[in-house]
Image (cartoon, grey):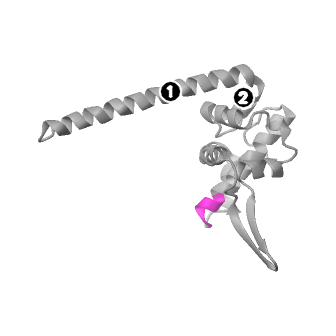
Amino acid sequence: MKFEYDTGTEVLRSRMRSFRFIDQEFRDVSTLLRKYTKTHFKRDYLLLRSIPGIGPIVASGILSELGDLRRFNSIKHLAGYVGLAPGIYQSGDTIRHTGVSMRANRFIRSYFIEASWQAIRTDPVIQEYYRKHQGKNVKSIIVKVARKLLSRTLAVIKTGIPYEIGIIE
């Protein structure tokens, strides 16, 4: 790029140096995180990687944030912790459903939301589930898909059997 003043060129160079630094930091931390999870949670890491939509960074993030998933008794407990359980406001005779709970770990929720978009592209069962709900609010549909992905995650970890694409639960 050509700027009219030299200060514009210097500002662009400064921004590019900052971007390169942040990018390198992200790569270094991601590498360390994947190495840690492959060492301490190798079996669970490989099981999570068998699920469509869950890549190396998301699998490492899930395991580092949640630890051992076997500690959750049911999908309801895990969904409540992750924030994919519906929130309810109740006062007297009034009951309102408020969508996903905001009192949960937002990092893990975002991992599952992003993984859901990938799962829609790669798993025919999830694609069919997504298409079945099409026409509704896209955000509420992706939360449903994320909840389904979350239940798959818990099932794969608890059973110890890798996920097979296209198998209906």
State the quadrant of the N terminus. Answer: top left
In the figure, is residue 72 to the left or right of 113?
A: right
Question: What label does residue 127 carry, if any?
Answer: none
Relative height, residue 11 to residue 39 (above, below): below
| Residue at 60% in and 60% down | 139
Q: Are marks 1 and 2 in contact (CB under 8 Å)?
A: no
Relative height, residue 55 to residue 37 (above, below): below
Q: Closer to the N terminus: mark 1 or mark 2?
A: 1
Relative height, residue 122 to residue 55 (above, below): below
Q: Nearer the viewer, residue 134 or 2?
A: 2
Q: Which residues, given as a range, are shown in magenta?
A: 136-141
Provide the secondary structure element on which disc 2 rests. helix
Q: Nearer the viewer, residue 5 or 141?
A: 5
Provide the residue designation for mark 2.
Answer: 45
**Magenta residue check for 139:** yes
In the figure, is residue 139 to the left or right of 99?
A: left
Q: Is residue 142 visible?
A: yes
Q: Nearer the viewer, residue 34 or 6?
A: 6
Q: Is residue 167 visible?
A: no
Provide the residue designation for mark 1.
Answer: 27
Q: Amino acid at mark 2?
A: Tyr
